[in-house]
Each structure stands twice: as C-alpha cells, then as structure tokens.
Image (cartoon, rainbow, N blue to C red):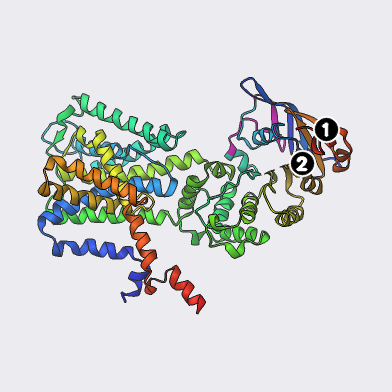
Amino acid sequence: MPPRFLVRHPYLLLVLAGVLFPLVGSEFWVGTVAARALIIGTMALSLTFLTSTAGLVSFAQAGVAGVAGYTLALLSPNVTGVGVEVAWPLAVGAALLMGTLAGVLVGWVSVRSSGIYLLMITLAMSVSLFYLVSQNTEVFNGFDGINGLKAPVVWGIDLRAPLPFYGMALTAAVLSAAAVLYLDRTPFGSQLHALRNAPRRVSALGFNAVALRIVAFGVAGFIASVGGVLNTWFSGQMSPGAVDVHAAVNLLVVAVLGGIRHPLGAFLGAITFVLLENYAASVIDRERFNLVIGVVFIVIVLFAKDGLSGLINQLRVHLNPAWTGGRRAKTRRKAA
Amino acid sequence: MHTAPILRVRDLSISFGAVRAVDRVSLSLEPGERHGLLGTNGAGKTTLFNAISGDVKLSEGSIEYKGRTISRLPIHRRARLGIGRTFQTTLTFADRTVEDNLRVAVMGSHGPRFAIGTWNRYGAQVQAARAVASRFRLDEVMEQPVATLSYGQQRELEIAMALASDPELLLLDEPAAGMSPQARGRLIEVLRSLPRSITMLFVEHDMDVALSLADRITVMRDGAIVASGTPAEIRATPLVREIYLGGKH
C-alpha cells in the first residue's frame, strides 16, 4: 500500500515520476523528448482547460502561444537582427502578457459562437496570424522567422542545457496543471462548468456569461503563452511554422488523444504524440508520421471517446483497488 | 392599501418578422402578488415572460421594475436587481452535484462572482445553498450529480436554483410541467409557503395549479390579453371556459 498522501493526491505520483525521470533517461530523452512533451502538453493544457471546464473549443491556442513566442523573440537577442533587446525577465513578462491578451481577444471576438462555429472562427483567427507573420518582413522577417534565440543563464545555471531546461519545462507544466486543477475547485471553476452545462441559466442567475467566457479564454491564453515561451527557447527560433494550420491541428490532435474531458489529458496526449513522432521515424519513414498519428487518432476517437484519460478512468473504475477508497469500496463497506 | 407596483409592463409588443407574438400588452404586479399567466400554446405567454426576464427583445412599449425602466438591461443585470426565473425545460448544470448547482446559484446575484478561493472560503454561500435545499428536501441528494435525480427532483431543483438567488420577483415558466400529481401537490405546497416578500409571475397550463396558487390571473390569446381577474372571476368567464373546458384549440 502506497503512502497515504500519495493515495489521496495521485497527481503527486505524476510529479514524482517527472522529477525522477532524469535518473533513468538519457540526455536526449530528458532534454529533447520529455521536455518537448511537457511543452506541447502545456500548450494543449490551455485547450483541455477550456473544453473540460467551460465546454469551449479553440483552434487558436497554437496561435496564442505563437503571439507569446513572437513577443519573446522580438524582445530577445537574436541573429536575425529584428526587434528590441530587453532584459529577459521583461521579455518573458511581455510575452506572457501579450499571449494572455491574445487569448482574451480570441474569446472576445468569438463570444457569440459555440461548437463547430467556435472552432471555425478561432481557426480563422489562427490563419490570419499565420499570414500576418509570414507576409510581414519588416517586423516578423516573413517565412524565415527569427532565429538564434536562447534561453537565458540564471544564477549561473544555463537553462539551455538539457537537464536545467527539462527542470524549467517540468516546473512550468506542473504549475500550470496545478493552477488548472485548483481553479476547478473554486467558485469560478464551478461557474465555468455551469457555463458548459447551461449558459442560459448562468445569465439568468446574474452572471455575466460573456465576461466569464472571456476570462476563461484569458486564463487559457496565459497557459498557452507559458508553453509558447518555452517552445521558442526549445526550438531556438520563432517562425510562421509554429502558428500554421498544421500546428493548430497538432494541438487539437494531442488534446483529443489525451482526452478533452480531463485537463491532464493534454500531457498524456503530448507524451503519446512525441513518442510516436520519435518511433515513427525509426520504424517507418519519417514522412509517414502523419499517417501513423492519423491512424492512432482514428482508433482513439472510435474506441475511446474520452481519449487516453478516459481509458484510464474506466480502468480505474473497473479495477478500483480498495486502498483508493473508490466508490465500489465504499458500497462494499456500506453493504457489510 | 395601495403600493407602487413592483412590475409594470406598458403597451408591450414583440414581433418576430411579420408575426406579432405579443400585441400591446399591459400588466402590473403589486408587491407580494401571485400572478398567473394562462393561455393556449402560441398565445404569447412565454414570449411575454421571456421579455420580462430579458431573453427576448421587445419591439415596442416598456417594462418597469420597482419604478426603474429595465427594457434594455441584459439578462444578468435584471437578475442582479432581483428578478429570478425558472425554465420550462429544466436547465440545470446536469453533470454537477446538486450542491454545486445551488451554491453557484447563490453567488449569481449576490456574488462574489469572480471568486477564486477554494469553496471552503465561502461558507456563508454554501450554508445558504443548504438552506434552500432543505426547503425542497434536496439535502439528501446534495452530493449527487443532477442527472441522477428523478424528474420531479430535477424540477424542484430548477425552482430551488431560482430561489437560491434570493429574488424579489420570481418568474416561473410552467413550474409543474410533466410532474406527477403527487409531486405537483408538494410543489404547490412549497410555492404557497414562500414569504410574501417574493412576488410571483407564473405561466401554467394546468388550471388547478394556476387557480390554487394565484391571487390574480391574466388570460392571453393570440398575443393579447383577453381576460384578467381573480381566480373566481376567471373561472366564470365564458371565454376561458371555452378555451380550457372543451373549446377548440
């Protein structure tokens, strides 16, 4: 039987696994594969937060992360010679702020639409951003983007090195996930769930449903921006490729793979995605990755409606070991 | 005794394209009054009702609440002024617990609305939710998701949520719709027991429910008011007898 606090807070096991992973993983696995999964997971978390609480979908989260990424790139030293160089904490702060504002803007523009129309309008905004950055050469340097970006050295720790970078990505992912799980237990979280269930009722009760939605998009924008900043440092560049339709679709695929009904599905999806990406390259041709991910996507959508997190949940309910104090254990105790 | 009306609807008209759903309707409710709105399907009751709550935009006329014109206020602003409503088709937060439904409802009109402490910090609101629950005997099922409740209980929650926001004017859209006779009786009992500090306007198809609850009744047909008076007067009106007792629909 595991220690009591781990049973009561199973998510701590995940954090523990993340912390211990560098002990078993090689530098490549830690600094490249795992760090990338955490970054993609954080960006996808912004989407699963929206879907699992407020029932909102967005194709624009990669774009929002891109706004943060471009802001960071333009305010950091780069080899392209664009933008203005400022101290890195200022650049990161500005990136998070701009990304959050972009999220708010997405929420504000799309405030009257839901479902498939919401998906379309957010896709349209995402595509607009892509064309803006790819066609503007003076500020964004067009298709070539902004290159030579590096994570800073803080208190003698080079955040570019694999282990520190992994630590930073893990910290960001854990804090973002904790924030989302925390919000779920607040009145604000309850109100978002209410919005998903019956928006008309939410207004009739005295809530400004429009404001609630926009704030939810703002929170999602902030989380996407955290991922966007890390992604920019990870790839060392910011180019239109990070905000194209492909990037938007990938994020949606990651979220659906992991399951959009649980916020942490984002990380399950991201791990699967990154693993497939690495193994597909070695098993069959690298060009065939989209085929592999497509097939996995279809299988998940067909056979596991709520993605991998839904599967885990089913498994948990099915096995339901007594020490978790689950529903079945309780009923048994009652019956006894 | 004459007091200023809590709700006054003046020459209200609502058109959807060429269709005039509500046609120059005037209505006024005294504080504490229980006012029933009767009429066949398509008579314009629900449209009038939705105009008062803010769900439907009015084409002409005005709505005053406590002496203030609210015709152009959005739904949530009207709710915060003390206008609560229920829905004909149950509109609850189905996959959330009964407790969560009620405590969210409590915070709607009184706030704090953008609260990001954990629920433990809002003891007063949670207590208020429990108090409403016990009035409807929902305290037994507080931890259950709404979707697992019986239909009757869901209807009761529908009304409990509106009451949780502590309204001064309560708009009930067919509160007893689809309920069993037994549950209906209990519901009427609860509604009758509400303090007179709450004014009620309700739409109801069931004559028995309407007549046993209302102080005054307004009958609508084709978007206009055709009769208005006490339950006894309404019962005696030939037109109402025609509409409700074997007349053509």
Q: Nearer the viewer, residue B224 or B148?
A: B148
Residue B105 location (% of width, % of height): 58, 51
Identify the subunit bearing mark 2: B
Residue B17 location (% of width, % of height): 61, 21
- The amino acid marked with disc number 1 is Ala
Q: Which mark is residue A149?
A: none
Task: Please indicate, yes or no, whether residue A152 appears anywhere in the rendered image.
Answer: no
Task: Please indicate, yes or no, whether residue A304 appears anywhere in the rendered image.
Answer: yes
- The amino acid marked with disc number 2 is Gly
> In this figure, which residue is indicated by the disc labeled 2?
B36
Question: Label 1 crowding class (10 Å Cα cut-off): few <14, some 14-19, many 20+?
Answer: some
Q: Which mark is residue B227?
A: 1
Count the marks.
Answer: 2
Magenta stretch encompasses residue A316: no
> At 34% across and 45% down in the image, what residue appears?
A47
Give the residues in magenta: B59-75
Q: Indicate left or right for A193 with A232 as reference.
A: right
> At 48% across and 72% down in the image, what residue appears?
A331
Q: Nearer the viewer, residue B152 or A226?
A: B152
Q: Indicate left or right for B41 with A249 as reference.
A: right
Residue A146 to residue A9: above or below:
above
Residue B115 to residue B218: above or below:
below
| Quarter where residue A182 is shown | bottom left
Residue A36 to residue A111: above or below:
below
